[in-house]
Image (tube, rainbow, N blue to C red):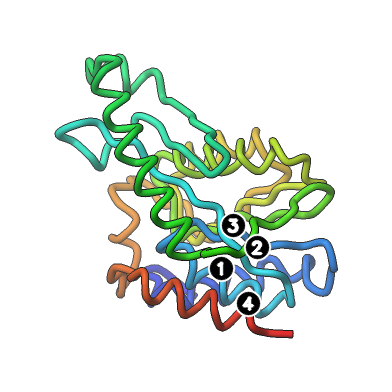
């Protein structure tokens, strides 16, 4: 596969090949970052014969510039802040708290919508593969890593189709391995490296998870 990536499913199949050594292990769980990471992770979980589940994360966007991440929150009330972005954007504590509360409500909504009554997976002693459809600043993935680390896994692997080299280097210091197929520069946005980067709906996420969770 070469750039541009056809779609998220194709990205997942290519990543699954790069992660083949994790196949057939009973301790592997693939955690998708919704929503875009779910179709990617589903292909990986299928190929590896691994459990598929979620790591819910929400980016904390700078007010007025929501695409710029000043931090992120994850399930388990984990929060990671990018102090450089906070300082340079001049965002005050009250504004930060307003964004945190808004994103916390959305995280809780998604938790109910996607998981329902299904309990979160037990990650202690397991090999966790965190998957998204791409990374820019890496703020959301950083929060996901912290949330996973708090549960004492045996190892943590980040798997993404595309990310800028500096983000990959930063995250590599936090996990056991980063598998990233492409690290182009300059890097403007994840979507520029896909042919089809259409939005993934709640319904699509629910359907993918239902299909996987009903498997024996």
Q: Check disc 1 and report the residue beneath it.
A: 41
Q: How many marks?
A: 4
Label 3, label 2: how far apart the Cα atoms are: 10 Å
Left or right: residue 167 compared with residue 14: left
Q: Where residue 202 appears, x then y in whole percent?
A: 36, 69
* Distance in Å between CA atoms under marks 3 and 4: 21 Å
User: Residue 27 bears which disc, if any?
Assistant: none
Q: Where 122 falls versus 52 (above or below)? A: above
Looking at the rendered structure, the secondary structure element under dot 3 is: strand
Structural distance between the alpha carbons of marks 2 and 4: 13 Å
Rendered-image quadrant of the C terminus? bottom right
**Mark 3 or 1 closer to N-term?**
1
Under circle 2, the secondary element is strand
Disc 3: CA contacts within 10 A as few (<14), some (14-19) or many (>=20): many
Which residue in the structure is indicated by mark 4?
213
* Label 1 packing within 10 angstroms: few (<14), some (14-19), many (20+): many
């Amino acid at each position: 596969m070469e750039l541009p990536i056809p779609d998220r499913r194709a990205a997942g199949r290519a990543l699954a090949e790069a992660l083949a050594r994790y196949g057939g292990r009973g301790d592997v769980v693939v955690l998708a970052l919704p929503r875009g990471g779910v179709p990617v992770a589903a292909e990986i979980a299928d190929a590896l014969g691994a459990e598929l589940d979620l790591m819910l994360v929400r980016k904390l966007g700078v007010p007025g510039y929501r695409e710029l991440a000043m931090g992120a929150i994850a399930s388990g009330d984990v929060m990671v802040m990018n102090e450089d972005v906070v300082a340079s954007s001049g965002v005050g504590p009250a504004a930060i708290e307003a964004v945190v509360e808004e994103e916390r409500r959305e995280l809780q909504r998604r938790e109910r919508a996607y998981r329902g009554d299904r309990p979160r997976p037990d990650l202690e002693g397991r090999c966790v593969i965190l998957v998204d459809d791409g990374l820019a600043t890496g703020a959301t993935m950083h929060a996901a890593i912290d949330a996973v680390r708090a549960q004492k896994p045996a190892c943590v692997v980040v798997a993404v189709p595309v990310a800028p080299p500096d983000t990959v280097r930063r995250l590599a210091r936090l996990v056991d391995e980063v598998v990233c197929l492409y690290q182009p520069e300059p890097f403007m946005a994840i979507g520029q490296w896909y042919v089809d980067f259409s939005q993934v709906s709640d319904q699509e996420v629910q359907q993918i998870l239902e299909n996987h969770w009903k498997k024996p």
